[in-house]
Image: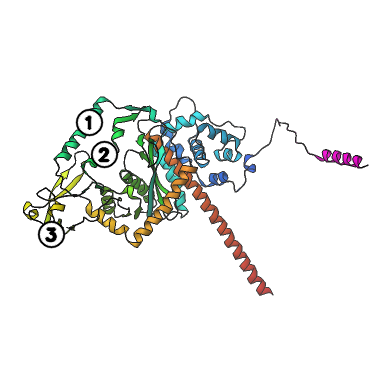
Amino acid sequence: MFKRNSNFKALKDKDMQGKKTYEETLFLHFQLSSKVPENNFYRRLKAILDLSFVRKLTAGYYGTEGQRSIDPEVFFKLMLIGYIENINSDRKIIEQASMRMDMLYYLGYNIDEALPWHSTLSRTRQLYGEELFLSVFRQILSLCLSEGMVDGRSQAMDSAFLRANASMESLQVQMEVEMNEFYQELSESEKQEQEQPVNHLKLVADDGTKEKDSKTKTKNKGKQNLIYKSTTDPDASISMKKGTKKGLHYYGQISVDTASHVICGAMADLANQRDAQCLPALLGQTKDSLAAHHLEVEEVLADCNYSSGPVLQQLEEEGIKGYIPNLGNYLPARKGFTYVPEGDYYLCQAGKKIPFKNLRTDHRDNSQTKIYTSSVKDCKGCIWSETCIKKEKYKHIEDTIYKPYYDRMHQRMHTRKGKAKRHLRSSTVEPVLGTLLQFRRMRRVNTKGLKLANKHVLLAASAYNIKKLLAFVSSKKTAAVAVAKDTIHSCDTVLNNLLF
């Protein structure tokens, strides 16, 4: 009896089990827009971002004969999908978009339409100029500005190495003529250092840093890039970070609004230079983007890698207040010597003047150094001569011509406001840079050449701003709905009190 009931129950459970059979429909009435939810990301992006303006800007790239090209608007939409979804392959972008109804709806394709071939994306990326990618970036930035997301006055800047699409095995020694120029420059530098007196104080270089001795001055991080070039990507530079292996890189430079973390400037640059050399171009692009909306940059926040005399001078001349720490080996004062700016001279601990004598120009980079020299009469018989000038006859001091700019920046960064600005910079731009590298595929450049690397950075920054924009609009709409509900509830309460 028990066995019979058990078999009956098992049979009953088996009969109730569902099974889905698939039969492909030959004719189907289907509307893609009805299947994409109203709150879907790409549906909201389609409604808020109009890229039709790129057709007019790209008209000059095409002739009147041959096959029709990919729609420029579709091209940029596919590019943005790749950066938003963190897909670093053109083939994968097409594959992903062909399987996603929301992406097809965003691109303007029906479910039975074939997307462009993946190689078309690569060719079109190379065809279009950098100014077109900058126009797309600025169009998205203008939407952020129109929503009131950007203040614009305070900009935080930072950079990161981007891995180039080339290996160290592709490096080759440059032409013999370039090698001869390099060795000639090196020999002239050594000769000039041998002619300098050895009794000088620690030198202050053109970028405001001190140099430990004459040998240190011959070391130049860019020398290896003068000797070697990659055969596959000549624009890629040999560079490395502390604790990592050498590699071929580009610089990814960004400028972020401290009020909203929206990227207001983005570009790629050569990695065989300091960040300070990249700042003027990045600042110029940022100022131009904001000027179109009547906004001006008033503050620049950056780390010590952006510190240099020319940069500090440019910021002061343009009326921009910089918060850029001097390099760690900057000399705010010299032990035993006091600088008197009114007379432009040094006063030693014996009370003797060491006046300014002349300017010296370095032929390698045209940087200028101020020379201060004491008289032999003043140093002779001085009780500090053994530790000050040792076996020499006079004191020799060198200063960068930008010393006043470094001194003012040193004082500013040691104020309470300066310390707060340093914290603001790190909490603003560093998370943005991390997001770009980890989630917006900016870490590696899959193309070759600086121009294509610049397009890569602009598209990554555009995708980041799109995410910020839609999140802001969504939160704004949610807040508006909440306010409307509170208003309705308040009105109902008032009405009930009046009636009852």
Question: Of the residues under marks 2 and 1, which one precedes in the sequence?
Answer: 1
Whole-percent x, y for residue 492 in the image: 65, 68
For discs 3 and 1, the disc positioned in front in the rendered view: 3
Are there few (<14), some (14-19), or many (20+) residues within 10 Å of tag 3? few
Identity, as a three-letter code, of the amino acid under mark 1: Tyr
Residue where numbered disc 2 is placed: 219
Are there few (<14), some (14-19), or many (20+) residues within 10 Å of tag 1? few
Would residue 8 be counted in the magenta stretch? yes
Q: Secondary structure at mark 3?
A: loop
Q: Is residue 87 left or right of residue 131?
A: right
Residue where numbered disc 3 is placed: 350
Q: Is residue 347 visible?
A: yes
- Say whether marks 3 and 2 touch (CB < 8 Å): no
Identity, as a three-letter code, of the amino acid under mark 2: Lys
Separation (CA) of disc 3 from disc 2: 35 Å
Q: Which mark identifies residue 371? A: none
Question: Of the residues under marks 3 and 1, which one precedes in the sequence?
Answer: 1
Query: Which residues are the magenta region?
Result: 1-26
